[in-house]
Image (cartoon, rainbow, N blue to C red):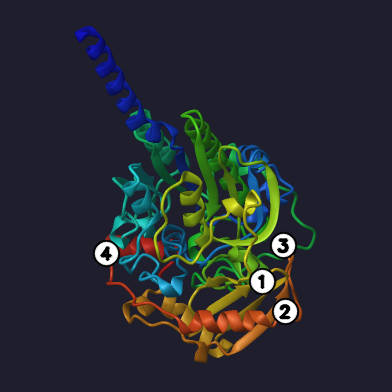
Amino acid sequence: MRRGIRVAAVGLLLAAATWALWPRAAAPNVLLITIDTLRADHLLCYGQALATSPNIDAFAARSAVFDRAIAASGYTAPAHTSIMTSRYPRRQSLAFGNGSRTQAGAATLADAFQRAGYATAAFVSNAVLNPKTGLNQGFEVYDADLPTAEAKRPTVYERLAPQTLERALAWLAKRRQQPYFLWVHFQDPHGPYTPPEPYRAAFQQPPVAGEPELPLLGDNSGRGGIPPYQALDGTRRASEYEARYAGEIAFMDHSVGQLIAAVEGDGPSIVALTADHGESFGENGFFFAHGHSAAPDLSHIPLILSAPGMRAERRAELVSQVDILPTLLELAGVARPSVIEGIPLGPILDGRAALPARAIFCDIGYEVAAYGPEGFLLAATPEDKTWSLAEFYQSGRAAQARAIVGAEQLTVTHTFRWDGGKTWSASDADASLATHLASYLVEGSAIGAPVSLDPADRERLRALGYAAP
C-alpha cells in the first residue's frame, strides 16, 4: 500500500515537473538581427544584381519577405527605438536625438520577453546605441563594447561583424533552461566603406563611361559630393563607393549566416532580419549619406521573417518597423504592451486578419513621409530653412533644445508614386495620406532627458557623421 502511495506521489511530482517545464520547452527562441545602413535593394533577394548576400538570400528563400518595409526614421537610434517600443519618433522620448537623448517611459520588446520568462541579451556595434540612451531597458546582458579603432581615425570605435558574432555565440553557448530573446546589431555597411580583402575588391566593376569624379565636401551632408568621413584615398567615383559598400555587405553576410544557423540549431525559433535605414547613392544629389530625407533611398529597408509553421513567400503589403514588436511577441505567444502603434503581421501572413487601412510614417524631424499602398506624401520645411534645421538636428542641438518641427513648419509637400523599387516619380497620391499625416503630426510626446556624453562619445558621433564638425 505504501509502495503504491510512493509510486503515485512520484508520478504526481514528475507530472507537475513536466507541466512546469513544458511552457519553457515549448516557447521558441527569438532572434532579432538589425543591420546598420542597409538598403533593401542592395541585397540580391531584393533585386541587387551582385551576389552580395548569399546567407541572407538563403534565409529569405525559406522565410516571409516583405518587399515594402519602411523605416520609422533615417537615424539609427530613433529607428531602433521605434523597433523596440512600437512607437514612431514623434511619440517616443528619444525623438530625434541620435544618441543624445534617452528612451524612457515606454515598455520595450525586451521588457515583454523578460516578463514572460525569457533570457534577454543584446550585442550592438554602433556608438549611438550605447546603454546611456536607455535602449538597454529589459536586457539582462547589453554588450556595447566597441574594441576596434578605425585605421585612419583612432578616436572612432566600432565592432566588426566577426567580433560581434563571437560575443553573441559565446552567450548562446551558455545553455539555459529558459528560452531567449537575442538582439544582434551589425554595423558594417555604415561608412566609411572599408571591407577587408577579399571583399574589398570582390565587386569592383570597370569605370562607367563618362562617370564624373565627385568633389570632396567640407561637411558630412553628402549633398553633391563625398562627406569627409566617407572619403577614401584616390576614390572619387560613385560606382567605386557602391562596390565598397557591396563588399561591406558581403563581409557582414558571412557572420549573419553563422548566427542564424546557431539559433536555428537550438530548436524552434523565430528570426527577424531588418535594417535601421538605408543610404543615398546619388538620389536627389546626395551621396553616401543618410538622415537627410524620408524618401525610399533611406526609408526602404529589408524585413525578413521566419517562424515555426510560417510558409516562405513574398508579401507586397506596406509594413513598418513599428510592426516588429507586436509581430515577434504575437508569434511567441507573449503579451504585448498596452500602448503600441504597430500591428502583428503573423495573422496577416496566415490569413487570420486583413491588413487595416493605414499610413506608414518615416520621420526625421524636418521632413516626414506618409506612405500608402501606391505612393507617398513628403512634407518638408522650405529649402532655405532645411539646411539650418538639418545642421540643428544632426549636431544634436535640436535634442538639447527639445525642439520638434511642427506641422505649421512642414509647408512644402510633394506626392510620389512608388512601387517598392529603386525609383519613384512625382504623381498624384491618395488624398487620404494628407489626413493621416496631419493626424500624426498633431500628436507628440515629451522628449527624454539628455544623455551624458563625455568628450570621447562626442568625437565618435562626430566622426561617424552624426554630429556637425
Left or right relative to 236: residue 24 = left
Measured in 3D between alpha carbons, the distance from the residue under mark 3 to the one under mark 2, in whole angstroms, is: 18 Å
Q: Are marks 3 and 4 in contact (CB under 8 Å)?
A: no
What whole-number distance in Å separates the C-alpha atoms at marks 3 and 4? 39 Å
Q: Secondary structure at mark 1?
A: loop
Disc 1 to disc 3, how far (Cα)? 17 Å
Do residues under tags 2 and 1 come within 8 Å of each other at their CB atoms? Answer: yes
Q: CA distance from mark 2 to mark 1?
A: 8 Å
Image quarter where the N terminus lies is: top left
Instruction: State if disc 4 and disc 1 touch (CB < 8 Å).
Output: no
Q: Can residue 173 be seen from the camera position used here? A: yes
Query: Circle 4 is placed at which residue position?
Result: 455
Question: Circle 3 sits on which residue?
Answer: 422
Name the residue: 73% across, 69% down: 418
188 shown above or below 236: above
Quadrant of the rendering where the C terminus is positioned:
bottom left
- Quadrant hosting residue 280: bottom right
Identify residue for label 1: 372
Element marked by disc 4: helix
- Within 10 Å of disc 4 (Cα), the crowding (few <14, some 14-19, many 20+) is few
Is there CB contact under 8 Å for labels 1 and 3? no
Q: Amino acid at mark 2?
A: Ala
| Disc nearer the start of the sequence (1/3) | 1
State the residue position of label 2.
Answer: 429
Q: Quote the CA–CA distance across marks 1 and 4.
A: 43 Å
Q: Residue 441: where, in percent of width, then height?
A: 50, 82
- Viewer-closest of 390 and 192: 390
| For marks 3 and 4 on the same chain, the one whose residue lies earlier in the sequence | 3
Between marks 1 and 3 in the image, the one whose residue lies nearer the viewer: 1
Pick whichever, 42 or 30, lies toward us: 30
